[in-house]
Image: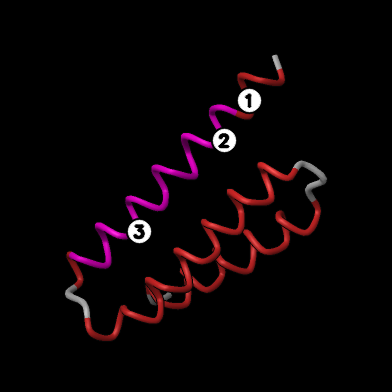
Amino acid sequence: MSSRSGLFRRAIECERLMNLSSNPAKKQIFKQLRDMSIALADESRSLSRRAIAEGIAAIEEIQSAFEDGMSKSVH
């Protein structure tokens, strides 16, 4: 699996979650994660592997912080 295809799959999943959510704040976060994934995938052809890995790590960090915040607000 290429990083590019993984980023597009992540974008598709964020789109799905965005459409399922009724919470406007969550919708916005999923939209931003989707847009970041698409932008990085589009730029990946001209970036080094290290730059792509750093971009993926940044997206994953944001998503993880968001998911941690969601799980804490449920409890």
> Residue 16's quadrant in the figure?
bottom right
> Residue 49's quadrant in the figure?
bottom left
The kind of residue on which mark 1 rests is Ser
If the image is split into quadrants, where does the C terminus sit? top right
Q: Main secondary structure of the magenta part?
A: helix
**What x and y, as percent, mark residue 42?**
39, 81
Q: Earlier in the sequence, mark 3 or mark 1?
A: 3
Q: Which mark is residue 71?
A: 1
The kind of residue on which mark 3 rests is Ile
The kind of residue on which mark 2 rests is Glu
Residue found 40% across the figure and 76% down from its top: 41
In the image, is residue 66 part of the stretch drawn in magenta? yes
| Residue range corresponding to the magenta coloring | 51-69
The residues bearing labels 3 and 1 have C-alpha atoms spaced at a distance of 22 Å
**What x and y, as percent, mark residue 19?**
78, 59
Count of marks, rendered view: 3
Is 27 drawn above or below residue 55 in the view shown? above
If the image is split into quadrants, where does the N terminus sit? bottom left
Q: Residues within 10 Å of mark 3 (few under 14, many from 20)?
A: some
Q: Earlier in the sequence, mark 3 or mark 2?
A: 3
User: Is label 1 in contact with label 2 (beta carbons under 8 Å)?
Assistant: yes
**Circle 2 — which element?**
helix
**What x and y, as percent, mark residue 30?**
61, 53
> Residue 48's quadrant in the figure?
bottom left
Pointer 2 residue: 67
**Circle 3 — which element?**
helix
Pointer 3 residue: 56
Residue found 40% across the figure and 53% down from its top: 59
